Image (cartoon, rainbow, N blue to C red):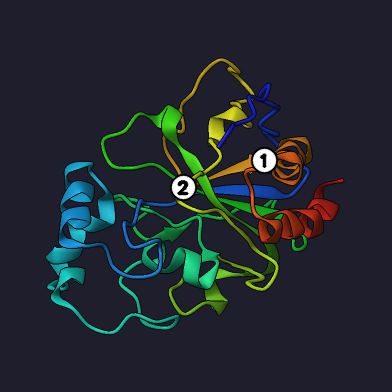
Amino acid sequence: MNTVVNARHSGNKKGEDGNVAFKVTYVDRNWSDVCTKEGYAANLADGRIWCNVQGESGYNCQDGGDVDEDTYPCLDSVALKTLRFSPGMTHGEKVSDTPKMCLNAKVGKLVLFTSRKPGELENTRFIFAVGKIAKIQDPDESDNGMQMFHCNKETALKFSKLYYPKFWDYHNNPNKMESISWATGLFRYISDATVNRLLEDVIKNRGFSERQKQAANKLIEAVR
């Protein structure tokens, strides 16, 4: 596919537009099942926290078992199937298991689901789905004690593994625009202008399917 090279846009530090990008661990079963053994080993080597600590509780996602929208080892493993994700929790001796809050996100705005393959550089981070926020669930209302974002599955834009748009072609860090670095945390606030440019590219680029273009057309109203 011929890609479109874009000037990167403001990261929208204060989050006033209400859009969010999530950092999702790479799952080699299309974020719809647990990783293969090879994928799990790669994530272990890449230092993915949950992959490395889950065994301490006696649980291992590689032991098998059914995976559906209500039963899964991690949110990453079903991110594309459920279109749900979370800012996660803060871990440490003083603030162990404290839910992180994405306070400036807004219902009706958009979520970018992003990932990168284990071992690859941050500049390869890609977008595998865009969803419209239908509900933001507070930690005390959710089953897992975390703030949860629920996106509308029917209107979501899902990209094919044949071509994922690159996250850093669109987003930049507001305090250091030339820096390509996610650093810590699972979310970033994203401006309307950034998401609009992404969706406009999908609509105009002949390499995307008609179904993807239709989804982009519906979602773009949220960032105009």
Could you tell me residue 112's position as x and y percent? Answer: 60, 50
Residue sitting at x 27%, y 48%: 48
Q: Which mark is residue 190?
A: 1
User: Which residue does the image show at 33% across and 80% down from the upper left?
Assistant: 67
Q: Which residue is more in the foreground, 140 or 84?
A: 84
Answer with left or right where residue 137 lies relative to residue 126: right
Quarter of the figure that contains the C terminus: top right
What label does residue 69 carry, if any?
none
Three-letter amino acid code at the position of disc 2? Leu
Displayed quadrant of residue 201? top right
Task: Check disc 2: other Cα within 10 Å, few if <14, some if 14-19, many if 20+.
Answer: few
Residue 93 appears in the figure: yes
Q: Secondary structure at mark 1?
A: strand
Taking 197 as reference, is 46 left or right?
left
Q: Is residue 155 above or below residue 169?
A: below
Q: Nearer the viewer, mark 1 or mark 2?
A: 2
- Specify whether residue 109 is in view: no
Q: Position of residue 150 (x, y in %)?
A: 61, 69
Front position in the image: 179 or 209:
209
The quarter holding residue 1 reads top right
Going 85% across and 54% down the picture, which residue do you hit?
221
Q: Which residue is mark 2?
A: 162
Looking at numbered disc 1 in the image, what kind of residue is underneath it? Ile
